[in-house]
Image (tube, rainbow, N blue to C red):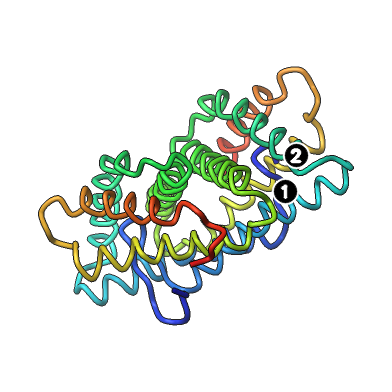
Amino acid sequence: MPMCGFNAKMLEGLAVFQEGLVEHGLHERSKITGQTVEERLQEELSDMGRFSQEVHGITDPELRDLTIGLSTFAKAFYRFAQRKGLENYKETAEAVNAFFVEMDRKYYGELQGQPEDMRKLAAHLDEYSRRVA
Amino acid sequence: MNIVGGSLNMPICGFNQQMTEGLKGFHNGLVEHGIINRSAKKNQAFEKTIEKELDDMTRFQKETHQIEDKEMRELTEALTKYASAFYKLVQKEGVDKYKQILQFLNKFYFEMDNKYYSELEGQPEDMKKLALYLNEISCKQANYSDGN
């Protein structure tokens, strides 16, 4: 895919990370803090929002972008999992991975080297996300 | 400092060992699959492969606004931004040092977790202090090759 090309190890790593966001970040943490899972989710989203306003304090550009990227990914996954129902988080993680696999397939299987390859790819992903999201 | 066993939490999500291992697998794949294997397949230098990947990601980032689903767009943009930043870090330090970079990133995320939950959580300006602390440790460890 245009961001790197995915292999099985990377997809598995992403799935584990996404599932951990819910299992550990919400379920386990809510037990520790005595909150409901929904309350924990709202606090995580609030924490990440506050953190994103301060991350400019990291002057190393790559570490700053890595931190922003990871935090933004986690926040978007929480919102998506909330929308799909938190109890369905494993299916949601699978759907996110399937989206990235489709990105890979479309780019390397069809679009790479074509004029406006990235515009076509983004348009395809928009269409794909309408079908599955 | 190694992250061995136990449970980690951090302000961007709440982290545990399994998640750290997941990220490690993703990082490994970015280098081994995305750079090393692809360079071998195309018979081109690592640097050229990285430049091509970065160029592809930059062009892609200009088009992701077309994905109307907000969460899918943000997931795509965030992962692209993350992969791009990771490749720039590998480019800066050298592909041959990627294992040290992976180790450093694990430590960086561990420090984020440790500082927040053991000291800053609940304090005024907790996130500002956290970002400043992360800046301090990133400056101290600018040379990833030492592996410390």
Image coordinates of residue A93 in percent, x first then y, are 53, 57
Left or right placement of residue B104 versus residue A8 in this view: left
Q: Position of residue B147 (x, y in %)?
A: 53, 65
Circle number at residue A48: none
Q: N-terminal of the two: label 2 or label 1?
A: 1
Query: Residue B49 shows which numbered tag?
Result: 2
Report the label total: 2
Whether residue A79 sits left or right of residue A49 in the image: it is right
Give the SS element for disc 2: helix
Q: Residue at x 21, y 48 (%)?
A: B128
Residue position marked by numbered label 1 in the rendering: B34
Q: Is residue A1 left or right of residue B135?
A: right
User: For the point 23% across and 56% down, which residue is it?
Assistant: A43
Q: Are marks 2 and 1 in contact (CB under 8 Å)?
A: yes
B53 in relation to B134, above or below: above
Quadrant occupied by the N terminus of chain B: bottom left
Please tell me which residue is depicted at 60% across the width and 57% down the height of the picture: B27
* Pointer 1 chain: B
The subunit letter for the residue under badge 2 reads B
- Looking at the rendered structure, the kind of residue marked 1 is Gly
